[in-house]
Amino acid sequence: MHAALAGECARCLDALTDEADVELSELFAYPASVTDETTDEDELPRVVDELVDVEQIVRDAVVLALPLAPLCRSDCPGLCPDCGEKWADLAPDHGHETLDPRWAALRGRLSAD
Ligand SMILES: [Zn+2]
Ligand SMILES: [Zn+2]
């Protein structure tokens, strides 16, 4: 079974879509079958009127197939912890030097010389 997934990158929170191939190996018991007589309804879902309720089963299978931390790409650099901008969008030398204003003034004077 093929499932389309939508989520967000665990690092930069970009929206992302993915696809998962889900193996459904669930068994169902037909009414009055040997399986029906030898298993409990809690163990095996029953076929009712030729139909089975697969929604829960599909959901469980998809959840198991999902990566724990989906990423938009495997080397996603994530977000700058200080300003929350994406590293991918920021200059390579981006940083947040918390410089005392007095030092900043001194540095300005030094570089003016
Ligand atoms: Zn990302
Ligand atoms: Zn930043």
Image (cartoon, rainbow, N blue to C red):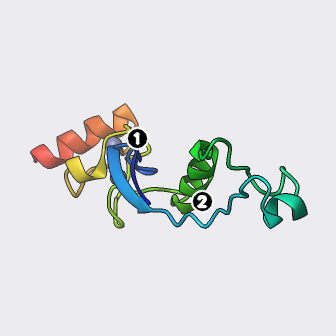
Residue drawn 26% across the image and 50% down it: 94
Residue at 35% of width from left, 54% of height from top? 18
Q: Which residue is mark 2?
A: 64
The residue at 60%/47% (across/down) is: 50
Give, as a three-letter code, the residue at label 1: Thr
Residue 75 lies, in percent from the top left, at 34, 66
Left or right, residue 19 beside residue 88:
right
| Observer-nearest of 67 and 29 | 29
On the image, which quarter does residue 73 sit in? Answer: bottom left
Which mark is in front, 2 or 1? 2
Mark 2 neighbour class, 10 Å CA radius: few under 14, some 14 to 19, many 20 or more: few
Whichever of callouts 2 and 1 sits on the residue coming sooner in the sequence is 2
In front of the other: 111 or 4: 4
User: What kind of residue is marked 2?
Assistant: Leu
User: Is the residue marked by circle 1 packed among few (<14), some (14-19), or many (20+) residues within 10 Å?
Assistant: few
Percent position of residue 111, x then y: 15, 48
Q: Position of residue 84 (x, y in %)?
A: 38, 39
> Mark 1 sits on what residue?
98
Q: Nearer the viewer, residue 59 or 29?
A: 29
